[in-house]
Image (cartoon, rainbow, N blue to C red):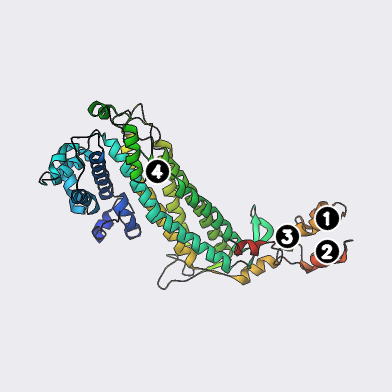
Amino acid sequence: MAAPALPGRPMPDAQLLALSPLDGRYAAKVDALRPVFSEFGLIRARVRVEVEWLLALAAEPGIVELPAFAAGDAARLRALAAEFSVADAARVKEIERTTNHDVKAVEYFIKERLQGDAALGPALEFVHFACTSEDINNLSYALMLAEGRDRILAPKLDELVATLRAMAHAHAALPMLSRTHGQTASPTTVGKELANVVARLERQRAVLAAVPMPGKINGAVGNYNAHVAAYPDVDWPAFSRRFVESLGLDWQPYTTQIEPHDGIAELCDAMKRIDTICVDLCRDAWGYISLGYFRQAVKAGEVGSSTMPHKVNPIDFENAEGNFGIANALFEHFAAKLPVSRWQRDLTDSTVLRALGTAFGHALVGFDALLRGLGKLSANPDRLAADLDAAWEVLAEAVQTVMRRHGLPNPYEQLKALTRGQGITAESMRAFVAGLELPADAKQRLLALSPATYTGLAERLARES
């Protein structure tokens, strides 16, 4: 369902007074999420579920008191959800001030709209028929999560992956010194390191997309008690399954009053892994900027430090890391808390579910900041080359491995004695190789090797990403 237009962003004074940065400083960055995860979005989803439930009941032959709606009548019903406006949501909230119950207010809103309709009016008491509030809520949140994931977060993740892949290909052959444990290690290429991130994110993107969004509609404690009391001859589990699947959701056959939220936990865990990969990327980019491997584009008028005029700080990567951290703290809480409910139901999940949009909001801000930071980067080949040329000791791995192949004695120990804690130069490394009893072709390959050319298949792997 296409999201209706919402009013413009809060006025500047409202932004300044906002308690959450998502409604203040970052308000413009999360506009796409507002129609989905706001109070408006939740009410709109509830109206959709209630309307579709009424239509499904009318289509069931066993429910003889509610005949199927004519096409035009069904269209008018669906228009309640498809054309649901902020003014409509305000009316629901006005009703809620009397009911002190949010789902009941939605039921009364729909009845209010139907009561003057000659064709739809007789169906009033089948609105919310045999439903507990959780029947409506769990399906509403599932629809919201699916929309937020598929329409907003997944495309943003795809944009990030595409950006990283383009960078990986552009820098596939640009050699870079590796650092394992912070120490010089076998060289790689800038592109290959970015390709690593592409592979990780693509795997988790597939996991995220495959997470099923379960839903249930089976009454007060999951046993269809009221349904069977009213219509004992209807196959209610089959009816429930058809209805849930008609919404594009996975049917959950066994529940208490609430859908157990395992699907939401799985979605949160998937998002958390994606955010964690992005945090890893942010920290590595931050470090490479610090080493001078990347330069950052200077933005006119921007200030890096309030006292040090020379600074161009990696603020986008820092901002992204912080927002991913907030998102993950929430995702972790959701995954740990939501699947736990006392006996057949407690209400602790209700307030927690309302914060789902906050986690997605911080993740979205993080993605935008990370993309902005990547867009400012340009590689610094001179700095990369200087570090490589100062690290000839990294060729010790290649030399001792070739020595092993050709049966020379104690190759690892010889290279350890030569290089560990020693200052190794191109001349000293080549002198060592020249003195080895190796076949001429093997010796020549080693003598031609330099830290900048000792990158294995890094370029190929980067280009294949």
- In the picture, which quadrant includes the C terminus? bottom right
Mark 3 → mark 4, Cα distance in angstroms:
50 Å
Q: Hey, what amino acid is under mark 1?
A: Arg
In the picture of the structure, the residue carrying the numbered disc 4 is 213
Which residue is at the far right?
437
Which residue is depicted at the point 62% across and 72% down? 382
Q: Is mark 1 on a helix, strand or loop?
A: helix
Q: Which of 238 and 103 is in front in this view?
A: 238
Mark 3 → mark 1, Cα distance in angstroms:
19 Å
Q: Which of marks 3 and 1 is nearer the N terminus?
A: 3
Q: Earlier in the sequence, mark 4 or mark 1?
A: 4
Label 4 vs label 1, nearer the camera = 4
Q: Hey, what amino acid is under mark 2?
A: Ala
Picture coordinates of residue 91, whole percent (x, y): 16, 48
Q: Earlier in the sequence, mark 3 or mark 4?
A: 4
* Left or right of 13 in this view: 148: right
Picture coordinates of residue 352, whole percent (x, y): 34, 40
In the picture of the structure, the residue carrying the numbered disc 1 is 405
Label 3 vs label 2, nearer the camera = 2
